[in-house]
Amino acid sequence: MFLTFLLPLAAVLAALSVRIVQQYQTFIVFTLGRFSRTLSPGLNLIIPFIEQTTSVDMRVLTRDIPKQQVITKDNVPVTINGVVYFKVLDASTAIIKVQDYNYAIGQFSQAALRDVVGGMTFDDLLAERQIISEEIEKIVRKESSAWGLEVVTIKIQDVDVPEELKKMMSRQASAEREKRATITKAEGDKLAAFNLAEAAKTMTASPGAMQLRTLQTIDGLGPTASNTVILAVPVELMELVKAYTDKKS
């Protein structure tokens, strides 16, 4: 009768004393409420009812930074969110010093994001997202290291602005493109005028250059019968014919 009672009790105690720890886990052991040791991956034994365990995931964890509205340094309201990647370095510290380290790092990252973005202008926010992420990461890493955590990286995901501001930005971008197009056209006109002036100088300095250009123009008109061509006879040619006529007479 005694053995019939003892064997099931021993089986229950054996089952309660076994802890199988996965490769990516660490178990924290509390003996009568006091931290005593950690359990490594594999098969481990504890004292039932005397020792209690808490598991800690040692892999890289992801925590969203919820969307929040922030006022930039130049008073532009933006809605911004991000994500923080971190992992537990010291399991006992993360469990003992922080009630919920996952929630704590998320809230601290949210506050750090608000502080960093609030100290930057809107243009810097759009252009320097990597710098913003690095600044937030620096602040969060400094605080979370005391919690037994390591921040891997923090990324800014979305930056939303009011619709009116989006329209203004679109008009500004359009104006900038039109400005560049006008400048490019003006530079092209300037270069064309310079080349025409150089060509005029060449024709003036070379006798017969104008006549050669005229013949090239006529040749380029093609054989179409409907073309009507009016030729302007150069003054030099008229003077040459007049001088020849005077000489003959």
Image: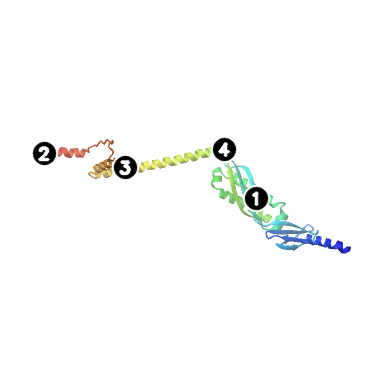
Mark 1 / mark 3, whichever is N-terminal: 1
Residue 248's disc number: 2
Residue 20 pos. (x, y %): 73, 61
* Residue displayed at 81% across by 62% down: 11
**What is the distance, in whole Å, between disc 1 and disc 3 at their CAs?**
66 Å
- Reading the chain from its start, which is encountered first: label 3 or label 2? 3
**Mark 2 and mark 1: Cα distance apart in space:** 106 Å
Judging depth in this view, the residue of 85 and 112 nearest the camera is 85
Q: Position of residue 170 (x, y in %)?
A: 51, 39
Which quarter of the figure has residue 161?
A: top right
Check disc 3 and report its element: helix, strand or loop.
helix
Amino acid under label 2? Lys
Tell me the distance, in whole angstroms, between the alpha carbons under discs 2 and 4: 88 Å
> Could you tell me which residue is drawn at 87 percent across and 64 percent down?
3
Q: Residues within 10 Å of mark 3 (few under 14, many from 20)?
A: few
Quarter of the image for residue 23 reads bottom right
Q: CA distance from mark 3 to mark 2?
A: 40 Å
Residue marked by disc 1: 63
Q: Check if mark 3's residue and mark 2's residue have beta carbons within 8 Å.
A: no
Going by the numbered disc 1, the residue's amino acid type is Arg
Characterize the local packing of mark 2: few (<14), some (14-19) or many (20 or more) Cα atoms within 10 angstroms.
Answer: few
Residue 78: x percent and y percent?
Answer: 59, 41
Expressed as whole percent of the image width and height from the top left, the position of residue 167 reads 53, 37
